[in-house]
Amino acid sequence: MKKILVASLVSAVFAVPALAADKADVIVVGAGGAGLSAAVTAHDLGKKVIVLEKMAYLGGNTNRAAGGLNAAESQPQAKAGIKDSKESHYNDTMKGGKYLNNPDLVHTLTDHAAESVDFINSLGGDLTDVGMMAGASQKRSHRPTGGGFVGANVVKTLAQASKDRGIDVRTMAKADELIVKDGKVVGVKYTKGKKQYEVMAPAVVLAAGGFSANQDMVVKLNPKLKGFATTNHTGATGDGITLGEKAGAATVDMKQIQTHPTVVPGKGEMITEAVRGNGAILVNKDGKRFINELQTRDVVSAAELAQKDKVGFLLFDNDVRKSLKAIETYIKGGMVTEGKDLHELAQKIGVDGKQLQATVDKYTKDQKAGKDSEFGRADMPRPLTQAPYYAVMVTPAVHHTMGGLRINSQAQVLDTKGHVIPGLFAAGEVTGGVHGANRLGGNAMADIVTFGRIAGRNASQQPTGVIIPRGEAPKAAAK
């Protein structure tokens, strides 16, 4: 989210001089959650790492991640008494992706996501609170205590870990080209200021994110999204995908572009899915519910676009507000309308008060009975009976690009014939295949940390392309 970026914290956190070396063991392109996870992992395996980040700050889109990191069979779940399974996480992910996902990649994600929670927590992060997200059958979205924003916490944690390790992180350093010799990726050409430099290494990890902020690229792949706003930061322009393609990499699922259903119109500010997960409902301008709020993002987005003016209102009460720390940021940012009761709120947002009251009364009755008679919502944690009441106008915006470079379960980039490109690895939104046709909320954070760590490990240990068994994963770093 634009107003909760931690750029000011992490832009000047490194004392390592730029251009301190022109050789490394591992080069990482991109300093978001995936790139920094790879860098810390590679460093802890004894490798010299250089990170190239084109923006002036660290974190990329990870700064804007609000909901959580999905993981099953985790220590925080066990502590909270939540019964979940990796198989359930796998099944939810495949179903949410309309079974277009690469099953091997999904198994890798769901088998090792709990280790990613341990990894971040071991570095001093706070992924101890567990909540519900849309498309999930269980509470498995790990986030900071009280339901705070997950991305800012993870970026701060990884940035501090990188600083503590003395990792060479170069900001305002835009990767221009992968250096390929004898079919192997052996370095990167990049521009910093007005000069171009080369840095050489036996392994390169691409972690430069997706392309949601590249309107031309989005519209070329899906013309229906012309004019849509985006929740992404300005640097999410698909650079890493282009770098990989020019080096012979294949892509997959490029037309699969996700919209997020709860974005404030005209501001590009995303309201975390956790608000719905903690009990909020969606109503239209007639004051009526129109969807099971915990359906997948594509389904909820489509339902909103079918409403008057293509918008809806997130509606919640004071009990929901108290349950989620993230909501305070939206209130302070002027995105939330408050009413002492439903009739006052309805008047302020231009909705019929009697209809809104009837909608909430029916939902409250269904919640007490444990059955949503209108839309079949399975999880209704709160009855919405505690005034004051709150509403946020929302509409869909381009949020996540599921397509990208084709990788295997070891985060190795594949060429158009399905062969490993020696020396080239990738992780995070720059890749495709993990999320299929639709990403579940909370799975992006699981993706970037899990595959970031795998890429960092394999780039360190097997840069020439030898396959490591899928069951192995890097161990969590010690505090």
Image (cartoon, rainbow, N blue to C red):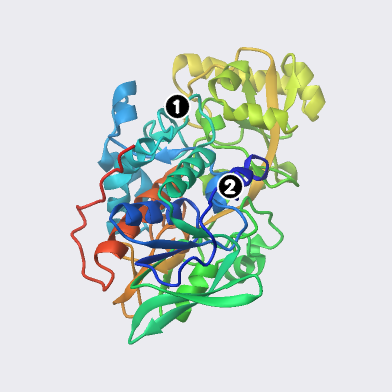
Which of the pair 94/287 is nearer the observer? 94
Which of the pair 212/316 is nearer the observer? 212
Is residue 124 visible to the viewer in this orientation of the structure? yes
Which of the pair 478/279 is nearer the observer? 478
Is residue 441 visible to the viewer in this orientation of the structure? no
| Residue 5 found in image quarter | top right
> Which residue lies at the image location 54% right of the left edge and 15% below the top edge?
365
Q: Amino acid at mark 2?
A: His
Image: 392 above or below 366 = below
> Which residue lies at the image location 45% right of the left edge and 72% below the top edge?
22
* Residue picked out by circle 2: 260
Q: Amino acid at mark 1?
A: Asp
Between the C-alphas of marks 1 and 2, the distance is 20 Å
Image: 364 above or below 458 = above
Which of the pair 177/220 is nearer the observer? 177
Question: Looking at the figure, which quarter contains the N terminus?
Answer: top right
Q: Position of residue 158 (x, y in %)?
A: 45, 45
Q: Residue 145, labelled with which disc?
A: none
* Residue picked out by circle 1: 379
Image: 254 above or below 435 = below
Q: Secondary structure at mark 2?
A: strand
